[in-house]
Amino acid sequence: MKKLLENKWIKIAGLILLGVALGWLVKPSGETSQEAGHDHLGTLTDQLWTCSMHPQIKLNEPGDCPICGMDLIPVASNSSSGNSNPIAFEMTPEAIAMANVSTTIVGGTDAKGDLFLTGKIQADERENAAITAKFPARIEKLYVTFTGEQVRVGQRLASIYSPELLTAQRELIEAVKTKASFPELYQAAKEKLKLWKLNEAQISEIEKSGQVKDKIDILAEFSGVVTQRNIAVGDYVSTGQVLFNVVDLSRLWVLMDAYESDLPFIKVGNEVNFNVAGIPGENFKAKVTYIDPMIDPNTRAASIRAEVLNRQSNLKPEMFVTARIQSTQKGSQAKLSIPRTAVLWSGKRSVVYLKVPNSEIPTYEMREITLGSRVGDNYQIESGLQAGEEIVTNGVFAIDAAAQLSGNFSMMNRPETRSLEVSSAFRDQITQIADAYFRVKNGLVSDQLNQSQKDLTEVKKAVSQVDMKLVEGKAHDSWMKVQAQLNAAVGTMEKASSIDEARKGFSNLSEAVLEMTELFGLNKEAVYKDYCPMAFGNQGAFWLSERKDITNPYFGASMLTCGEIKQTYLKG
């Protein structure tokens, strides 16, 4: 047996068998560990971190960008809510905080004539006051030691020592002794102390005690908040030197900037509804009290001022506000403007991100816009936005980079569009067609067949007046097809003997007008693609509307509000 164990070949064979046995024993746990490792890796890749300036950077942990050194931001995933909209991107609250995302309301005038402006809270200049030294003195003690402290009339602010005040007290004490014989001296001595802002109680105490007080308290002459303390213990102050600045914040100003194109729609007395970011969900009201007569040459805007009572002291100076002014004039053509920081600039047609309203998870939607001229730190908007919409003004690069990483559309990867580039003059002409179409539609809404057929004449006239020389190439070919559809649909409606037949023809007319709108755009602020699922025996039908509320041309008064908005077309 001993010789057998000493044989090297037997030893090698035994070691091989032992290795196989050990490998078989540890194999299950090894596979489990590997699977666990894969699960862990999957968890890490679910939370990616990227750079807002270099979205190609993808790391599984936070840190700094290896290219520019900026802090990496977490990337949200759209899989949690099943959002399939490729131009809408969801972000977690943590990602929003890391990217420092902030939004603002687009300024300008909406279809109702309400003007949206941005601005901030300021203290009422008339409520600013300075508490000054009435005589030379040395500061012995301070009772108000920091700015922001609330003070009331008569409250002690500081104690002072003044040789001049000591002399004035001695004069009063001596005058009291000869008050009966020389009342004029007594009144003069007393009046001197009053002019130095000693109150009746202080003067009476000096008279009764007959003792000179080496220290006198300075009392607050106004109520408010201390905005500046200009003295310290031991300071020597001279007559007229400002000791404290105090402002009363019970009434505040709301200062807003309005472009010159907005000014015709603002009057003194207009009601202002505004919100502040620091007090979410609360609406405040004020009235316009002043319109600056001068235009700022840099911003091309004038300051609009409203006054608001700050009863609960929750409004604070320098708070940013978004305001809506109810104008008495409707349909303003004032241009919209947005901050430069909101734009991902790529030429005249650039990108912004809008906050999707009423979404459970914070969602931001990419929107391509057409920029106008730059005025100061703002861009005017020619098309793509409406007044009152909420856009991202800070953190837009972070949202775009995260959307790109998640496979959504972004500034560098935009969706294809059917829209064709045409001149504004051509859009003006086809907008005339749409206006005539709206009159036909409204006749059917009112169940008036004769009126609708009468208005078809205006549609034909507008179609015939379109100058084909204004379009060329693909746009020209597309217009020829749309023109033929329009004329055929008008002919069908003209021959209709009943309102039901007219409504079938109107469906074809609507398809042609919708095609025209999608291809070329209209020079109207907003129009709406509406859909009724119950039209024509539940087959469904579309129509274009100039108003946001539903008025159904396929049913009229019998089912006036049946339908829903499927799409909104903005100007251009």
Image (cartoon, helix red, strand yellow):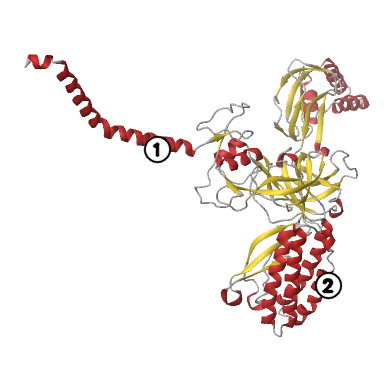
Q: Which mark is residue 450?
A: none
**Foreground disc of the pair 2, 1:** 2
Q: Name the residue at 77% across, 79% down.
A: 453
User: In the image, residue 483 lies at what x, y percent?
Assistant: 76, 68
Indicate whether 207 appears above or below 92.
Answer: above
| Residue 330 shows in this picture | no
Outermost residue to the front:
9
Q: Name the residue at 77% across, 19% down.
A: 160
Q: Residue 572's image quarter? A: bottom right
Q: Name the residue at 78% across, 41% down.
A: 378
For badge 2, the amino acid type reads Lys
Q: Residue 397's image quarter? A: top right
Left or right? Give the position of 98 relative to 465: left
Q: Residues within 10 Å of mark 2 (few under 14, many from 20)?
A: few
Residue that numbered label 1 is attached to: 39
| Residue 390 shows in this picture | yes
426 or 307: nearer the eye? 426
User: In the image, residue 239 lies at what x, y percent?
Assistant: 86, 21
User: In the image, residue 223 lies at what x, y percent?
Assistant: 75, 35
Left or right? Give the position of 86 relative to 342: left
465 or 3: nearer the eye? 3
Outermost residue to the left:
1
For badge 1, the amino acid type reads Asp
| Disc 2, SS | helix
Q: Which mark is residue 461?
A: 2
Q: Are marks 2 and 1 in contact (CB under 8 Å)?
A: no
411 or 323: nearer the eye? 411
Q: Name the residue at 20% across, 29% down.
A: 21
| Disc 1, SS | helix
Question: Which quarter of the figure is the N terminus placed in?
Answer: top left
Distance CA(mark 2)–CA(mark 1): 69 Å
**How many marks are shown on the rendered structure?**
2
